[in-house]
Image: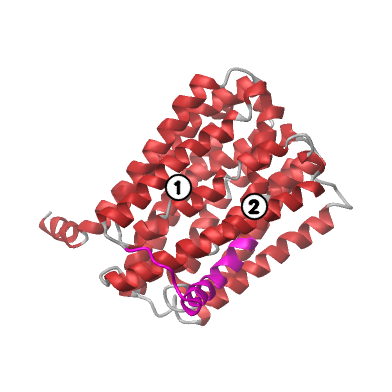
Amino acid sequence: MPKIIETASRHKLLIENFSYLSALQLLNMLLPFVTYPFLIRILGKEVYGLVIFSQAVIGYLVILVGFGFNVSATKEVSIYRDNPEKLSQIVSSVLIIKSSLCFFSLIILSIVLWFIPKAHGYVALFYLTMWLCVYDVVFPVWYFQGVERMKYITWLTLASRLIFVGLILLFIKSPADYLLVPIINGIGAVVAGLASLYIIFISHEVRFSKQPYDVLKYYFKEAIPIFVSNVSIQIYASSNKVILGTFLGMAEVAYYDLGEKLVAILRIPQGLISQTLFPKINKDKDIGFVKKAFHLSLLFNIFLTLVLVIFSRKIIVMLGGEQMLPTIWVVNILVLTVPIVAMSNIFGIQLLIPFGYSKPFSKVIILSGLVYLVQLLLLWPTLGFNIYNISIVTIITETFVTMYLFYLCKRFNLWINAPA
């Protein structure tokens, strides 16, 4: 018992951050499912699928706006958080770059909408869904992760989610109200974003200032490897919904979205582990610690996978009614990604990046995008697309990523020489 207390005391900040992140992810997990049964029944699966389709399209632009700063900026902030001048430089540079990318993404959207047949007649929906890009700019999660003050993220996200839930239940009355969904989402996001900026610039006394070109260029270049990997990840994250919406219909988008949402819940613990441990691993470089985290997280994720497989039918009917039963096999296929992604997260984010192997990591992710595209090119003229084989393509791609990352960890002696 004294040893446990001593260990807890030594890692007090780590435990506190993990607790706040746990609360945050619990909110992110539960609150969307408060509104989901309501929205799917009021809007119907076709209109709801259209809303999800627009989010999937804008998801590509969110990757552009985020530009890898979720990792690179977190790393910089964690290193220089006790240096006020350097910290102000980092925050100012990242916000300037992300704001510029957000404006550029709006121009891209205006061009792309001409080439998306499904967007014709729903242009307003896509522009309103741009709140996702604005939120990525004004809510700097990377800063709070870097200074290891996750409590701010938790409370601000809670406020944002509660605003969304309350307004959705109050104002969505029929399928004709579908445009209110992105509007309400945007209101909650902007409130949380402005509050977070107040904390950074007023409470934490970080100074915002214009940065010279060379400084902006440095932070931009530092984020490029992560950005490239994020692009490849997004190819087989959002593209599945875009493909289903384009070639099949919005009902299929709704089926796949529900399956993906349920599986995403199971990925939350691994996300917590990753976000909490990354600043510590980045500073301590303790490979043995990473291996211990790997073994525990893998066992836990296998357990979660089995639980969802057993109860998937009951959960789907409870959330969306029997109209959403085609989701069952999507869940049973995609759930295999839970332990697979848990392993790849440890190999990539917690080992390769902190130990200076960002470029090999990025190459693997880029190659995974090519693997995904090759599968689609083979599938399209042979079997065609459906929600099931698209799900299988995702499993194959994630497995490829995990195996290759593990190979790199062994190659760079980040796994073999580490004590378990």
Residue that badge 1 annotates: 268
Q: Residue at x 40, y 69 (%)?
A: 90
Q: Amino acid at mark 1?
A: Ile
Counting residues from the N terminus, which is met first, the one under dot 1 or under dot 2?
2
Residue 106 is labelled as: 2
Is 63 placed above or below 413 here? above
Does the segment drawn in magenta span residue 162?
no
Q: Residue at x 69, y 51 (%)?
A: 109
Q: Nearer the viewer, residue 308 or 10?
A: 10
Q: Nearer the viewer, residue 75 or 95?
A: 95
Q: Residue at x 22, y 60 (%)?
A: 11
The quadrant in which residue 420 appears is bottom left
Q: Magenta region, mostly helix, strand or loop? A: helix
Q: Nearer the viewer, residue 251 or 192?
A: 192
Is 214 placed above or below 272 here? below
- Coordinates of residue 408 in the picture (x, y in percent): 54, 76
Left or right of 76 in this view: 247: right
- Coordinates of residue 255 in the picture (x, y in percent): 67, 34
Q: Amino acid at mark 2?
A: Leu
